[in-house]
Image (cartoon, rainbow, N blue to C red):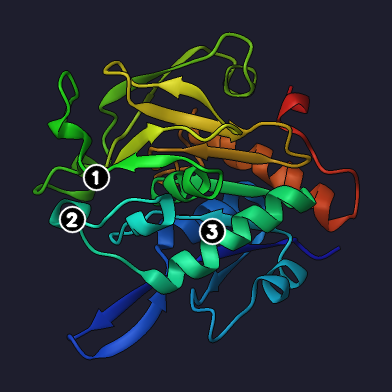
Amino acid sequence: MRRPIVGIIGNHHLINDSYEIHGGGRMNSEAVSQVTGAVPLIIPSDPAIVSVAELMDTCDGFLFTGGRPNVHPEEYGETPTPAHGDFDRNRDRIALPLIQACVAAGQPILGVCRGFQEVAVAMGSTLHPEIRELPGRMNHRMPPDGTIEEKFALRHTVTFTEGGPFHRLMGAREVMTNTLHGQGIKQPGARFVIDGHAPDGTHEAAYVADAPGFTLAVQWHPEYRAAEDPVSRPLFAAFGDAVRAWAARKAPQSVRQIA
């Protein structure tokens, strides 16, 4: 039996300031292959190249990854400012409708960092452009210097809702995570259910209410050492279970069914 296919939403990059590519981090591909048990397929995020319908027909699930550009604030009804940073409008035009279509169909999705924010915006949420400037918040951004190990080091706890899907999945109400983001959720949409918080109140884990399929999203980066990390591994493994169920055309796994 073939492995299911997980589409990894790619990011636009310029090599040597001139050569355009759609790329994906090796950590994401390794997590999908090694822990989810699926074939990782990097998606060119451009509606001139691929359509939502084609992607859903080709892939069994989708990983919405982190990325330097942010979701454009027009997508949640606000005016862009310098604080909002860089944008990738083509990724917005693929990722947001793809999330909405997958949620409606029950096709599994997993959101990570920017992907967490994409799921939030697709479900009607708004974003803060720079949460470290809010009273009482810590700096969640990636350290500017140091090794990869230092940048992805565990930096704060995340506390999950008692009895919620993340508590059931992790077997613990509190876990340690890394943190490498500047933006955060301002106002969650009606169906975007916050299921975990950092000590400063920043929203860190969520799912889509009443979705017929797997719709978990996290603000941290679980792809780092996913095969050995005790928090990352169950997250990608549960995603894999949902993807295989979809590939076999079984009933999609609801977040409420996570043991």
Q: Please name the residue that numbered disc 3 is placed on.
A: 96
Q: Nearer the viewer, mark 2 or mark 1?
A: 2
User: What secondary structure is marked by label 2?
Assistant: loop
User: What secondary structure is marked by label 1?
Assistant: loop
Seen at 74% across and 50% down, the residue is 104
Seen at 13% across and 33% down, the residue is 133
User: What secondary structure is marked by label 3?
Assistant: helix
The answer to whether mark 2 and mark 1 are in CB contact below 8 A is: yes
Measured as percent of width and height from the top left, residue 237 is found at 64, 40
Other residues around mark 1 within 10 Å, as few (<14) / some (14–19) / many (≥20): many
- How far apart are the alpha carbons under marks 3 and 1? 18 Å
The answer to whether mark 3 and mark 1 are in CB contact below 8 A is: no
Q: Look at label 1 and name its amino acid.
A: Pro
Quick check: 242 above or below 134?
A: below
Q: Please name the residue that numbered disc 2 is placed on.
A: 81
Residue 43 picture quarter: bottom right
Locate residue 149 relative to residue 189 in the image: left or right.
left
Q: Please name the residue that numbered disc 1 is placed on.
A: 129
Locate residue 183 relative to residue 209 in the image: left or right.
left
- Which badge, 3 or 2, is on the more N-terminal residue? 2
